[in-house]
Amino acid sequence: MSENTNSTTTDLDYKKAKKKEEMKQQVVTFALMIVFTIIAFTMVTAGLDKLFVIPILIILAVVQVGFQLYYFMHMSHKGHEMPSIMFYGGTAVAFLTVLTMLVLVWW
Amino acid sequence: MSQEHTLNPEVFPDEPEKATLEGKNKFLGFWFFLGGETVLFACLFGTYLALQGSTVGENTAENLFGLELVFIMTMLLLTSSLTSVYAMYHMKNNDFAKMQVWLGITVVLGLAFLGLEIYEFYHYITHYDFTFRSSAFGSAFYTLVGFHGGHVLFGLLWIITLMARNAKRGLNLYNAPKFYIASLYWHFIDVVWVFIFTVVYLMGKVG
């Protein structure tokens, strides 16, 4: 019985440590997101060529959103198959929607 | 096993938000909803991009927007995303008091963001006479950014309601999914904002 209790405590400690480790990763993710944001704003204020700046801005935004989804919203965890299908399904329709509107108006 | 024991186990399971069937259903349903929200915002982004150039007079994106304010707003919302991650970290450790504190910080940061956004709109309307009816660009801008602001307001009311409703209840497997879902919503608001500050403000400023 006492052995049993012991192993539960070790298990709990292990899980707690694991969560703590994950929390550290989250903070690193956050720091990276801040850095990306600062890069994006600095590039715009620096007044570089717009054909060079705009693609980089979009890449930075996509990467930052990926961080948000996979780390902050835990999409990297197990059991997110259906959420991924639903969210990417939405993203695919979203992409087509934007494309359609731009083609309709700008053509 | 009584229901009381099921909802308040001595040791919280690994994923308290998905420990009950109701929690699992909420989790799946909410991600489905987020897929729909993505499409909704895509419509507004598409409209904005299409009508961005349809300005009247001097009130163009380049002349109007001030990046300092937008930068501060971005930092506030980004930080509030991290604080809600901290809240969920404490939720998983079954530490109700700390979760409430971090949620409280999230709410304060969200309110600051909303205050700055209201100031921004007020400034455009009073100093530049740039309103919803000024131009197609004005309509598209206020619809897109205002819709996001409406989401921030809704998220704040949601989190505040959860905090107040469960203040004396403590944390259990019945309300853990509720907190988790609200934090997902909050992160999604930040996801949308990343595209708003990139597409509307930064790309608007570049020209």
Image (tube, coloured by chain):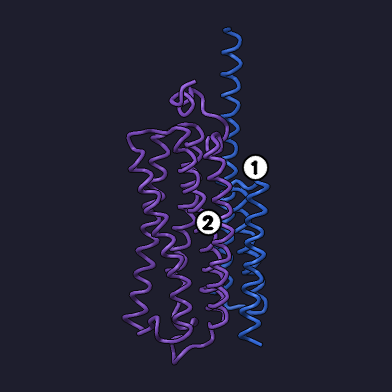
Chain colours: A blue, B purple
Residue nearer the viewer, B32 or B180: B32
Subunit under mark 2: B
Judge whether residue B88 can be spotted in this image. Answer: yes
Vertically, is B32 above or below B56?
A: above
The image quadrant where one finds the C terminus of chain B is bottom right
Q: Residue furthest top?
A: A1
Q: Residue at x 51, y 53 (%)?
A: B187
Q: Position of residue B188 (x, y in %)?
A: 53, 56
Say which amino acid is labelled 2. Answer: Phe
Vertically, is A75 above or below A43?
A: above
For label 1, the SS is loop
Structural distance between the alpha carbons of marks 1 and 2: 17 Å
Q: Position of residue A83 (x, y in %)?
A: 63, 50
Q: Position of residue B68 (x, y in %)?
A: 44, 69
The residue to which callout 2 is attached is B188
Disc 1 and disc 2 in contact, CB within 8 angstroms: no
The residue to which callout 1 is attached is A77
For label 2, the SS is helix
Callout 1 crowding tier (Cα within 10 Å): few <14, some 14–19, many ≥20: few
Q: Residue at x 44, y 63 (%)?
A: B73
Judge whether residue A41 can be spotted in this image. Answer: no
Say which amino acid is labelled 1. Answer: His
Vertically, is B52 above or below A57?
A: below
Residue nearer the viewer, B51 or B203: B51
Instruction: Find residue B76 and report its image quarter.
Output: bottom left
Residue nearer the viewer, B185 or A90: A90
Vertically, is A79 above or below B68?
A: above
